[in-house]
Image: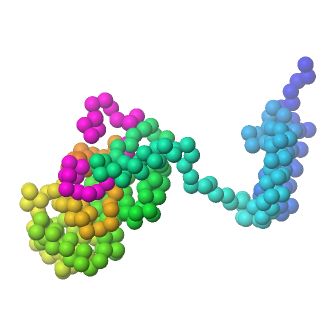
Amino acid sequence: TPKKKSPHDPSGYQYYSKIAASLDDVGLPASLSGMLRNLLDCSRSEFRGEESYSSFADVLTDLKLVRNNPCCYLDSLGNSPTFSIPNRLYNRLSVTNKIIDLYHSEACKCLIVHGRAGVGKSSLLNQVLAAISKQDGSFVAQAKFEQAGINPLAIVAQMFNSLCEAFIRDAQPRAKAAVTRELELALGVAGIKSLSLVVPSLSGLLASSDTGSGVQYMNRAASVSYALGKLLEVISAHFVPVTLLIDDLQFADGISRSIISSMLENAAQPTFFVCCYRDDDVKPGDDFSSW
Protein backbone atom coordinates (compact mmCIF):
# COMPACT_ATOMS: atom_id res chain seq x y z
CA THR A 1 0.00 0.00 0.00
CA PRO A 2 1.26 3.50 -0.71
CA LYS A 3 2.65 5.34 2.25
CA LYS A 4 0.50 8.18 3.63
CA LYS A 5 1.87 11.64 3.18
CA SER A 6 2.77 13.48 6.35
CA PRO A 7 0.92 16.73 6.99
CA HIS A 8 4.37 18.33 6.82
CA ASP A 9 5.04 17.02 3.31
CA PRO A 10 6.29 20.02 1.23
CA SER A 11 4.02 19.17 -1.68
CA GLY A 12 0.95 19.27 0.52
CA TYR A 13 1.10 21.08 3.82
CA GLN A 14 3.42 23.90 2.77
CA TYR A 15 1.40 24.60 -0.37
CA TYR A 16 -1.82 24.64 1.65
CA SER A 17 -0.29 26.94 4.30
CA LYS A 18 0.93 29.38 1.66
CA ILE A 19 -2.48 29.70 0.03
CA ALA A 20 -4.30 29.87 3.36
CA ALA A 21 -1.99 32.64 4.58
CA SER A 22 -2.55 34.64 1.40
CA LEU A 23 -6.30 34.74 2.06
CA ASP A 24 -5.68 37.24 4.86
CA ASP A 25 -4.12 39.66 2.39
CA VAL A 26 -6.88 39.50 -0.22
CA GLY A 27 -9.38 41.48 1.85
CA LEU A 28 -12.18 38.92 1.87
CA PRO A 29 -14.63 38.88 4.78
CA ALA A 30 -13.48 36.52 7.51
CA SER A 31 -16.46 34.21 6.92
CA LEU A 32 -15.59 33.64 3.25
CA SER A 33 -11.92 33.19 4.08
CA GLY A 34 -12.93 30.53 6.56
CA MET A 35 -15.01 28.71 3.96
CA LEU A 36 -12.10 28.70 1.50
CA ARG A 37 -9.72 27.45 4.18
CA ASN A 38 -12.08 24.61 4.98
CA LEU A 39 -12.28 23.69 1.29
CA LEU A 40 -8.50 23.74 0.92
CA ASP A 41 -8.11 21.71 4.09
CA CYS A 42 -10.16 18.88 2.57
CA SER A 43 -7.19 18.06 0.32
CA ARG A 44 -5.19 17.00 3.37
CA SER A 45 -7.33 13.86 3.73
CA GLU A 46 -6.72 12.14 7.08
CA PHE A 47 -4.69 15.13 8.28
CA ARG A 48 -7.40 17.71 7.73
CA GLY A 49 -8.61 19.82 10.64
CA GLU A 50 -11.85 19.25 12.54
CA GLU A 51 -13.53 22.30 10.97
CA SER A 52 -12.89 21.23 7.37
CA TYR A 53 -15.80 20.09 5.24
CA SER A 54 -16.45 16.37 5.44
CA SER A 55 -18.87 16.19 2.51
CA PHE A 56 -20.25 18.18 -0.38
CA ALA A 57 -23.50 18.46 1.55
CA ASP A 58 -21.70 20.57 4.18
CA VAL A 59 -20.36 22.88 1.49
CA LEU A 60 -23.79 23.19 -0.07
CA THR A 61 -25.32 24.09 3.30
CA ASP A 62 -22.90 26.99 3.76
CA LEU A 63 -23.40 28.19 0.19
CA LYS A 64 -27.16 28.27 0.73
CA LEU A 65 -26.62 30.34 3.88
CA VAL A 66 -24.53 32.80 1.88
CA ARG A 67 -27.26 32.99 -0.78
CA ASN A 68 -30.13 33.39 1.72
CA ASN A 69 -28.39 35.78 4.10
CA PRO A 70 -25.58 37.50 2.19
CA CYS A 71 -25.20 40.39 4.64
CA CYS A 72 -24.13 38.00 7.35
CA TYR A 73 -21.32 36.60 5.20
CA LEU A 74 -20.32 39.31 2.76
CA ASP A 75 -20.07 42.30 5.12
CA SER A 76 -16.70 42.65 6.80
CA LEU A 77 -17.26 42.79 10.56
CA GLY A 78 -13.75 43.13 11.91
CA ASN A 79 -11.79 39.97 12.45
CA SER A 80 -14.81 37.69 12.41
CA PRO A 81 -18.56 37.74 11.81
CA THR A 82 -20.91 37.96 14.73
CA PHE A 83 -23.76 35.64 15.53
CA SER A 84 -26.32 35.26 18.27
CA ILE A 85 -27.56 32.20 20.10
CA PRO A 86 -31.30 32.38 20.82
CA ASN A 87 -32.09 32.49 24.52
CA ARG A 88 -34.54 29.60 24.48
CA LEU A 89 -35.25 26.46 26.43
CA TYR A 90 -35.62 23.21 24.54
CA ASN A 91 -37.42 20.08 25.74
CA ARG A 92 -38.12 21.69 29.11
CA LEU A 93 -41.80 22.53 28.65
CA SER A 94 -43.08 20.07 31.27
CA VAL A 95 -40.56 21.29 33.86
CA THR A 96 -41.29 24.93 33.02
CA ASN A 97 -45.04 24.43 33.42
CA LYS A 98 -44.51 22.61 36.70
CA ILE A 99 -42.47 25.52 38.12
CA ILE A 100 -45.12 28.01 37.00
CA ASP A 101 -47.90 25.92 38.56
CA LEU A 102 -45.99 25.66 41.85
CA TYR A 103 -45.37 29.40 41.84
CA HIS A 104 -49.09 30.12 41.54
CA SER A 105 -50.04 27.45 44.07
CA GLU A 106 -50.95 28.78 47.52
CA ALA A 107 -49.74 25.53 49.06
CA CYS A 108 -46.18 25.93 47.75
CA LYS A 109 -43.86 28.41 49.38
CA CYS A 110 -40.46 27.06 48.42
CA LEU A 111 -39.09 25.24 45.39
CA ILE A 112 -35.93 23.15 45.70
CA VAL A 113 -34.09 22.50 42.44
CA HIS A 114 -31.07 20.23 42.34
CA GLY A 115 -28.98 18.43 39.76
CA ARG A 116 -25.45 17.89 38.59
CA ALA A 117 -23.23 20.81 37.64
CA GLY A 118 -23.77 22.11 34.10
CA VAL A 119 -27.20 20.61 33.42
CA GLY A 120 -28.81 24.08 33.10
CA LYS A 121 -30.51 24.60 36.46
CA SER A 122 -29.64 28.30 36.71
CA SER A 123 -30.52 29.06 33.08
CA LEU A 124 -33.85 27.31 33.44
CA LEU A 125 -34.79 29.16 36.63
CA ASN A 126 -33.63 32.55 35.38
CA GLN A 127 -35.70 32.27 32.22
CA VAL A 128 -38.81 30.92 33.91
CA LEU A 129 -38.74 33.48 36.73
CA ALA A 130 -38.10 36.29 34.24
CA ALA A 131 -41.18 35.20 32.28
CA ILE A 132 -43.25 35.08 35.47
CA SER A 133 -41.99 38.52 36.51
CA LYS A 134 -42.93 39.95 33.13
CA GLN A 135 -46.41 38.54 33.55
CA ASP A 136 -47.25 39.51 37.13
CA GLY A 137 -44.74 42.31 37.81
CA SER A 138 -42.98 40.41 40.58
CA PHE A 139 -39.46 41.24 41.69
CA VAL A 140 -36.73 38.60 41.72
CA ALA A 141 -33.80 39.09 44.09
CA GLN A 142 -30.94 36.67 43.56
CA ALA A 143 -28.08 35.37 45.65
CA LYS A 144 -25.49 33.17 43.99
CA PHE A 145 -22.91 31.70 46.33
CA GLU A 146 -19.34 31.18 45.19
CA GLN A 147 -17.02 28.31 45.97
CA ALA A 148 -14.32 30.62 47.29
CA GLY A 149 -13.26 34.24 47.50
CA ILE A 150 -16.53 35.92 48.55
CA ASN A 151 -17.99 36.04 52.05
CA PRO A 152 -21.30 34.10 51.94
CA LEU A 153 -22.94 36.57 54.33
CA ALA A 154 -22.03 39.42 51.98
CA ILE A 155 -23.89 37.60 49.20
CA VAL A 156 -26.98 37.30 51.40
CA ALA A 157 -26.71 40.99 52.31
CA GLN A 158 -26.42 41.97 48.64
CA MET A 159 -29.62 40.09 47.84
CA PHE A 160 -31.50 42.08 50.48
CA ASN A 161 -29.79 45.27 49.38
CA SER A 162 -31.12 44.83 45.83
CA LEU A 163 -34.59 44.20 47.26
CA CYS A 164 -34.46 47.41 49.30
CA GLU A 165 -33.18 49.39 46.32
CA ALA A 166 -36.07 48.17 44.17
CA PHE A 167 -38.60 48.93 46.91
CA ILE A 168 -37.27 52.46 47.49
CA ARG A 169 -37.21 53.06 43.75
CA ASP A 170 -40.64 51.70 42.83
CA ALA A 171 -42.87 51.74 45.92
CA GLN A 172 -45.41 54.46 46.62
CA PRO A 173 -44.66 57.01 49.38
CA ARG A 174 -47.45 55.60 51.54
CA ALA A 175 -45.95 52.10 51.30
CA LYS A 176 -42.49 53.41 52.21
CA ALA A 177 -43.89 55.19 55.26
CA ALA A 178 -45.71 52.04 56.34
CA VAL A 179 -42.58 49.90 56.00
CA THR A 180 -40.52 52.39 57.99
CA ARG A 181 -43.14 52.50 60.74
CA GLU A 182 -43.47 48.71 60.96
CA LEU A 183 -39.73 48.16 60.98
CA GLU A 184 -39.30 50.68 63.79
CA LEU A 185 -41.92 48.86 65.83
CA ALA A 186 -40.26 45.48 65.20
CA LEU A 187 -36.58 46.44 65.45
CA GLY A 188 -36.42 49.90 66.95
CA VAL A 189 -34.63 52.83 65.37
CA ALA A 190 -31.26 51.56 66.60
CA GLY A 191 -32.05 48.15 65.19
CA ILE A 192 -32.84 49.58 61.76
CA LYS A 193 -29.67 51.66 61.78
CA SER A 194 -27.63 48.62 62.76
CA LEU A 195 -29.24 46.55 60.02
CA SER A 196 -28.46 49.33 57.53
CA LEU A 197 -24.78 48.58 58.14
CA VAL A 198 -25.48 45.16 56.60
CA VAL A 199 -28.03 46.39 54.04
CA PRO A 200 -26.83 49.91 53.11
CA SER A 201 -29.79 50.85 50.93
CA LEU A 202 -32.05 50.46 53.95
CA SER A 203 -30.81 53.86 55.13
CA GLY A 204 -33.01 55.34 52.41
CA LEU A 205 -36.05 54.46 54.52
CA LEU A 206 -34.77 56.20 57.64
CA ALA A 207 -36.12 59.60 58.58
CA SER A 208 -32.55 60.78 59.01
CA SER A 209 -29.53 59.60 57.06
CA ASP A 210 -27.32 60.18 60.12
CA THR A 211 -26.52 56.76 61.61
CA GLY A 212 -24.64 58.37 64.48
CA SER A 213 -21.25 57.56 65.86
CA GLY A 214 -22.54 55.41 68.67
CA VAL A 215 -24.92 53.07 66.87
CA GLN A 216 -26.14 50.38 69.23
CA TYR A 217 -26.25 46.84 67.99
CA MET A 218 -29.58 45.07 67.98
CA ASN A 219 -30.47 43.00 70.99
CA ARG A 220 -30.52 39.23 70.87
CA ALA A 221 -34.21 39.06 69.89
CA ALA A 222 -33.41 41.20 66.87
CA SER A 223 -30.40 39.26 65.61
CA VAL A 224 -29.29 39.53 62.00
CA SER A 225 -31.33 36.47 61.10
CA TYR A 226 -34.44 37.83 62.80
CA ALA A 227 -33.92 41.33 61.37
CA LEU A 228 -33.48 40.13 57.78
CA GLY A 229 -36.56 37.93 58.14
CA LYS A 230 -38.60 40.83 59.48
CA LEU A 231 -37.31 43.10 56.72
CA LEU A 232 -38.43 40.59 54.11
CA GLU A 233 -41.79 40.13 55.77
CA VAL A 234 -42.56 43.85 56.00
CA ILE A 235 -41.41 44.77 52.50
CA SER A 236 -43.24 41.80 50.95
CA ALA A 237 -46.49 42.97 52.55
CA HIS A 238 -46.24 46.41 50.87
CA PHE A 239 -44.58 45.59 47.56
CA VAL A 240 -45.08 43.58 44.39
CA PRO A 241 -44.74 39.79 44.75
CA VAL A 242 -41.18 38.93 45.77
CA THR A 243 -39.17 35.87 44.72
CA LEU A 244 -35.81 35.03 46.26
CA LEU A 245 -33.63 32.91 43.98
CA ILE A 246 -30.80 31.39 46.01
CA ASP A 247 -28.36 29.63 43.71
CA ASP A 248 -25.39 27.31 44.37
CA LEU A 249 -26.54 26.86 47.93
CA GLN A 250 -24.04 24.06 48.42
CA PHE A 251 -21.33 26.74 48.73
CA ALA A 252 -23.13 28.66 51.50
CA ASP A 253 -21.70 28.52 55.01
CA GLY A 254 -23.59 27.39 58.10
CA ILE A 255 -24.68 30.89 59.14
CA SER A 256 -26.05 31.77 55.71
CA ARG A 257 -27.96 28.48 55.54
CA SER A 258 -29.34 29.13 59.02
CA ILE A 259 -30.61 32.57 57.95
CA ILE A 260 -32.29 31.15 54.87
CA SER A 261 -33.75 28.21 56.80
CA SER A 262 -35.16 30.60 59.41
CA MET A 263 -36.90 32.65 56.74
CA LEU A 264 -38.34 29.51 55.19
CA GLU A 265 -39.86 28.53 58.54
CA ASN A 266 -41.58 31.90 58.92
CA ALA A 267 -45.06 31.25 57.54
CA ALA A 268 -45.98 34.94 57.77
CA GLN A 269 -43.93 35.82 54.71
CA PRO A 270 -45.68 35.76 51.30
CA THR A 271 -42.32 35.48 49.55
CA PHE A 272 -41.68 32.64 47.10
CA PHE A 273 -38.31 30.95 47.63
CA VAL A 274 -36.34 29.08 44.98
CA CYS A 275 -33.27 27.24 46.29
CA CYS A 276 -30.89 25.64 43.84
CA TYR A 277 -27.88 23.45 44.50
CA ARG A 278 -25.59 20.88 42.90
CA ASP A 279 -26.41 17.48 44.32
CA ASP A 280 -23.08 16.03 43.16
CA ASP A 281 -21.34 18.45 45.54
CA VAL A 282 -23.50 17.53 48.53
CA LYS A 283 -22.42 14.68 50.78
CA PRO A 284 -24.91 12.16 52.24
CA GLY A 285 -26.34 13.40 55.52
CA ASP A 286 -25.98 17.08 54.59
CA ASP A 287 -28.55 19.42 56.15
CA PHE A 288 -30.20 19.80 52.74
CA SER A 289 -31.92 16.49 53.43
CA SER A 290 -34.07 18.19 56.07
CA TRP A 291 -35.22 20.85 53.62
The one of 234 and 221 positioned closer to us in this rendering: 234
Asked if the magenta segment contains residue 98, the reply would be no
In percent of width and height, residue 178 lies at: 19, 74
Asked if the magenta segment contains residue 271, the reply would be yes
Residue at 72 percent of width and 59 percent of height: 80
> Can residue 198 be seen in the rendering of this structure?
no
Residue 6, placed above or below residue 156: above
> Can residue 209 be seen in the rendering of this structure?
yes
Q: Which residues are magenta?
A: 263-291
In percent of width and height, residue 238 lies at: 25, 68
In percent of width and height, residue 185 lies at: 11, 69
Task: Write down the quadrant of residue 183 in the picture.
Answer: bottom left
Residue at 62 percent of width and 54 percent of height: 85
Task: Write down the quadrant of residue 66 in the picture.
Answer: bottom right
Residue 88, placed above or below residue 51: below
Q: Quadrant of the N terminus?
A: top right
In percent of width and height, residue 143 lies at: 35, 55
Q: Quadrant of the C terminus?
A: top left
Would you say 217 lies left or right of 206 here? left
Count of numbered labels shown in the rendering: 0
